[in-house]
Image (cartoon, rainbow, N blue to C red):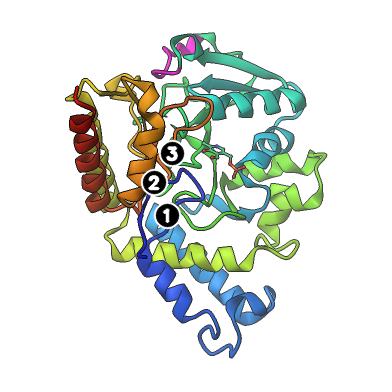
Amino acid sequence: MSRACNFSAGPAALPEAVLLKAQAEFLEWRDARASVMEISHRGPAFMGLAGEIEARLRRVAAIPDDFAVLFMAGGATAQFALAPMNLLHGKARAAFVLTGNWGQKAFAESARFAPTDLWASSEDRGFDRIPELDPERLHPDTAYVHITSNETIAGVQFHDWPDTGGIPLVVDMSSDILSRPVDWSRIGMAYAGAQKNIGPSGLTLVVIRKDWLQRCEQAQVPRVFNYKLQAENDSMLNTPNTFAWYMVGLVLEWLEESGGLEAMAVRNREKAARLYQAIDTSAFYHNRVLPEYRSWMNVPFHLADETRNAAFLQQAEQAGLLALKGHRISGGMRASIYNAMGLDCVEKLVAFMQRFEQEAGT
Ligand SMILES: Cc1ncc(COP(=O)(O)O)c(C=O)c1O
């Protein structure tokens, strides 16, 4: 058996070169005479590695010096609560744009802890777009606008930051981080679970404006979830997931060797265009998202005849195309085509889809 094309939405495929390097270094990492996961996170070897990884991440993603970079636990889900708990005090409010189910979850969690407004939602359109946004309608005490830059289930992506009338963004970048260059000038904080584009699960990246850290002084949160304390302690207030952290380092190395985020963006756009073109030119498959808002990372699609779903999935798996089943909320199919997914796998999927359509006799 050989490795298949894995379209999993997350945990997702990692670059093969990364897995091979991790395998080669598994028993003995550098000159530690032990595995990287067997050494102290506070020792000079791991602290050195953590420093290298942060420097590489800053270089790759062009993160400005006035942002802190944190690695935390609890996934992006913890950040749904931690952002309002750390950042909103007194009259300060959050405003949300909802373009899919993850934004809905973040919104509901934020409302449990702080004043939270629904600025706009495309739920009434079945999340097929980014809704119209009028900055005049934002409450004057709005401290940040929360968006989900890529909705992993709905397949809706912001290709530009919205006009918020100057209010900073808090962005859930879980499913499109490191997939394209980022304009940090409009961002107050970004967060992402690692398990799609950065590495394995179990680590969450938080990038936050340093001047926002003062706000965390008043936060009623456990110390390990306080952004300011984590920044002061190099994200090592407690024992972090050192192996996942190391894997993130390998992914970043691979990203740099592959040409960085500009090159990734070109590749990702090409892969997505190929798949959407195959869907749009067929009467057998369809995608419900308006073209200008479609995701380059997660491509949901439906078969015209949904009774064929099970056969599609079974035959796809036999053809070496894994994890194409859509999320249970949306049904149908979904191809997640993150950074590690090559155009060759997308071409293989397109060829399979065309074959399946012909055999279905439509
Ligand atoms: C956009 C988005 N936000 C948040 C989450 C939740 O992430 P986690 O499982 O790391 O808490 C996911 C998971 O798929 C996601 O896709």
Quarter of the image where ligand 1 sits = top right
Pointer 3 residue Cβ closer than 8 Å to ligand 1: no
Q: Main secondary structure of the magenta part?
A: loop
Which element carries disc 3, helix, strand or loop? helix
| Residue at numbered disc 2 | 7
Classify 10 Å Cα crowding around label 1: few (below 14), some (14-19), many (20 and above). many
Amino acid type at circle 2 is Phe
Residue 222 left/right relative to 82: right
Q: Is residue 305 above or below residue 250?
A: above
Residue 225 left/right relative to 334: right
Query: Cβ–Cβ below 8 Å for labels 2 and 1?
Result: yes
Q: Quadrant of residue 185?
A: top left
| Residue at numbered disc 1 | 13
Q: Is residue 292 above or below residue 179?
A: above
Which of these two is toward me, 346 or 152? Answer: 346
Measuring 47% from the left and 20% from the top, which residue is drawn there? Answer: 165
Which element carries disc 2, helix, strand or loop? loop
Which of these two is toward me, 238 or 143? Answer: 238
Question: In front: mark 2 or mark 3?
Answer: 2
Percent x, y of residue 171: 52, 35
| Residue at numbered disc 3 | 185
Stretch of the chain drawn in magenta = 127-136
Percent x, y of residue 4: 35, 56
Q: CA distance from mark 3 to mark 1?
A: 31 Å
Indicate yes or no whether the magenta region holds residue 361. no
Which element carries disc 1, helix, strand or loop? loop
